[in-house]
Image (spheres, helix red, strand yellow):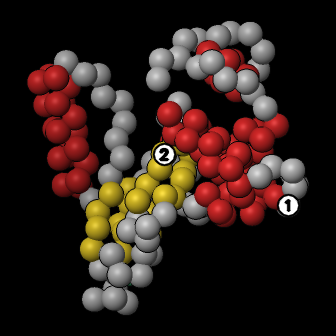
Amino acid sequence: MSCRREKEGSEWEGRFRGCGYRWTLSRQAIIEALSSTSDHMSAEEVYNAVQKKHSSIGLATVYRTLEILVGMAVVLSFDFGDKRARYELAERFSKKDHHHHLVCNDCGKVVEYTEFIGDEIELLNKTEKGLSKKYNFKIDNHVIQFYGLCKKCQ
Ligand SMILES: [Zn+2]
Ligand SMILES: [Zn+2]
Ligand SMILES: [Zn+2]
């Protein structure tokens, strides 16, 4: 998707219009739902959350909107192994701190951690530097996810 910068209207309106979309009530409601939770919601959960205030927003609209938001890099879609996509606002739009995920393959539990171990930070810094150089790509963030078994499931 190629979006251009559109300065007219509010920030969100400009962002949507710049990507060729309108800034609608349902889009606003879905972003609100995603920013007011610390969970990684499925489309159905997003639908249930927006239904409380806006009963006219259908499930199909929620699916379509999430797809658009992922395409705009406003929302990240995750696969935690439970066969449905989970959504989270991209970090620059989110109130959450930068975190990584530990995902349990058995029960699907997701641990978000912000206390990075020293080696991790060093490795990531080195990796980002090396990749930037090799591919001439300016890296400003990353998404890290580890899979395995949680304490209970081991
Ligand atoms: Zn990180
Ligand atoms: Zn588990
Ligand atoms: Zn998360």
Name the residue located 64 percent from the left edge and 41 percent from the top edge: 65
Q: Quadrant of residue 75?
A: top right
Residue 24, x across and y down, in percent: 78, 32
76 to 92, vertically: above or below: below
Report whether 107 appears left or right of 46.
left
Report whether 132 appears left or right of 23.
left
Q: Which residue is mark 1?
A: 52
Residue 124, x across and y down, in percent: 22, 44
- The secondary element bearing badge 1 is classed as loop
The answer to whether residue 69 is seen in the rendering is: yes
Query: For the C terminus, which image quadrant?
Result: bottom left
| Mark 2: few/some/many CA within 10 Å (<14, 14-19, 20+) | many
The one of 138 and 79 positioned closer to us in this rendering:
79
- The secondary element bearing badge 2 is classed as strand
The answer to whether residue 95 is seen in the rendering is: no
Identify which amino acid the numbered label 2 is placed on.
Leu
51 to 81, vertically: above or below: above
Using the image, tell me which numbered label, if any, was put on residue 76: 2
